[in-house]
Each structure stands twice: as C-alpha cells, then as structure tokens.
Amino acid sequence: MWDRLYPYFLWIENTRLGHGIRESKWTFTLAEVFHLLGLTLFLGTVLILALRLCNLVLRDKGVAETARELMPWSLAGLFLTILTGTLLFTSEATKCWGNVAFHYKVLFLSLAIPFQFTALRIVSRADRQGLPPAVRKLTAVVAVLLWFGVAVAGRAIFFF
Amino acid sequence: MLGGFAITFVTGAMLFWSLAMRCYGSPFFWAKVIMLMLAGVNIGIYHLTIDRRSAEWDTLAIPPAQARIAGLVSLTLWVGIIAAGRMMAYFL
C-alpha cells in the first residue's frame, strides 16, 4: 500500500510550497527551529501532566485542574509542531517516503495522537478522580512512551 | 527540573566532546554558550534576591516585577538556546 502512495508524495514535493522551502535554506532551517520549539512546549507540558498523573509533581493541585491549565499550552505546542512539520515534510516528501525512520514516526504518531485525545484526556477529567492510581500511571507512561517514540523516530530520519 | 537539566547537560557535553573543534568555529555555538551562562546568572540573581523574600509574595496573583522579569528573561534565553542549538547543525 505504501508503494501506491509514492505518486502523492512526489506530487506534494513538487508543489510550489515544497519547491520554495527546499530552495530556501533559511525557510527550512527556521521551520526546523520552530518545529523544535513547538515540540519542547508540547512534550514539556505533556510530561508535566504525566508526572502529575504519577503523583510525582504538583500533588496539592488536582489532576483535572493541572490538565485544564496545561491544555492551551499543549495544543499551541502541538499546533506549531504539526504546522512546521508539514512544511518540512512537504519539502522532502519522497525522501520521507523511502525513509524507515519516517515510517516508524508515522506509526507512532498514528498511535500517539488518538491516545492523547482519548485515554489521556479521559483519565485527566475531574469526574474520573476515582480511577485506580495504577490506571492513571499506566496511561501517563504509555502516552509519554508513544510521544518519545515519535520524537526518537523523527530525530532518526536524519540518519537514514 | 534538575533531573531534566542533568540529562541534557551530560548528553550535551558528550555531543560537544565529539565535535569540539567544529563547535569552536560556529557562531551559533558561542551564542548558545553565552545564553546558557546568562541563564545561569539570571537564575542565580533570582535565588539570591527576590526569591529570598518569596514568603511575602508567594500567594499573590501577580508576582513582583523583579520575579516576572526573571521569568521573562529565562523564557527568552531558553528559547534562544534551543534555536541556537538547532542552528549549529547548519553552520558547524
């Protein structure tokens, strides 16, 4: 199935946007800088929520309250990361197509995003305060591992 | 926070060790070093001055100006450090 997608990857790369980013060194570099800044903001806030779910930080603050306060920052970080990531991808879509690390990144992303907005969101809600601590901890650990999988695979694209 | 700093510091030192001479020639590396030192100075000043009197303003909705400035300087420097670190890869 992946093979059949090649023409689409090629098409994306050959759009004017793809060309523009590829030709301009500064656009690519700046997109990477902002990709990293967005990623720091997103992973940082997810990590704080995960540590709270594991009862390791902000113990005097409720889980739901912590989640609510962090949410806008997480979403802003994720938005910036996805936006810049799309730009970076557009400029080298066919390289990504044949890159094994990119395949793993797509795999981890397709697990991490749904997990983030279902399981993690549900255990962070106020009406779920009664959930067993083990369930909360496991959810937090899985979310962090999935996002770290995305990050590690993303970093690895460069080496393949 | 110190745990995260320790991991970043140790792995960063290892990366630097492997490419020390190339870092030496990179303007972004020096920008990063200067910003790291300024971040250290900033947090040092914070702990030695306004943080000493934190009991007076701990529960206030808006912390005193000096504390807010320290926070803003810290945020700015760390964003700059991340940006400079990423730019190093292109100008080593």
Image (cartoon, coloured by chain):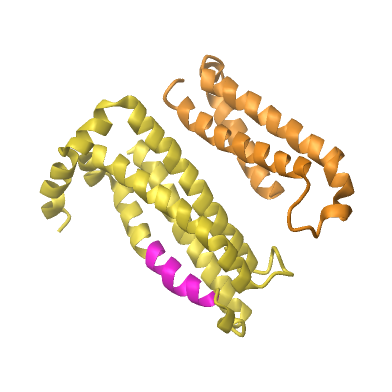
Chain colours: A yellow, B orange
A80 shown above or below A61: above
Residue B21 horizontal/vertical position (percent): 54, 16
The boundaries of the magenta stretch are A112-123
* Residue A4 shown left or right of residue B68 in the figure: left
The structure residue drawn at horizontal position 14% and vertical position 53%, both measured from the top left corner, is: A5
* Residue A48 shown left or right of residue B64 in the figure: left
Snapshot quadrant of residue A90: top left
Along the line of sight, the residue nearer the viewer: A131 or B60? B60
Q: Residue at x 14, y 49 (%)?
A: A8
Depth order, front residue of A47/B70: B70
Within the image, what quadrant is residue A19 found in? top left
Query: Which picture quadrant has residue A88?
Result: top left
Residue at (27% x, 44% y) in the render: A99
Q: Residue lying furthest top in this view? A: B25
> Residue at the location (67% across, 36% down)?
B73
Q: How many labels does the image show?
A: 0
Lateral position of residue A118 relative to residue A70, left or right: left
* Drawn side of residue A44 relative to residue A151, left or right: right
Whole-percent x, y for residue B13 in the image: 62, 31
Instruction: Return the residue nearer the eye: B25 or B16.
Output: B25
Picture coordinates of residue B11 (x, y %)? 59, 38
Toward the viewer: A121 or A76? A76
Q: Position of residue B3 (x, y in %)?
A: 68, 49
Helix, strand or loop: magenta stretch: helix
Q: Does the magenta stretch include residue B88?
A: no
Q: Is residue A122 one of those drawn in magenta?
A: yes
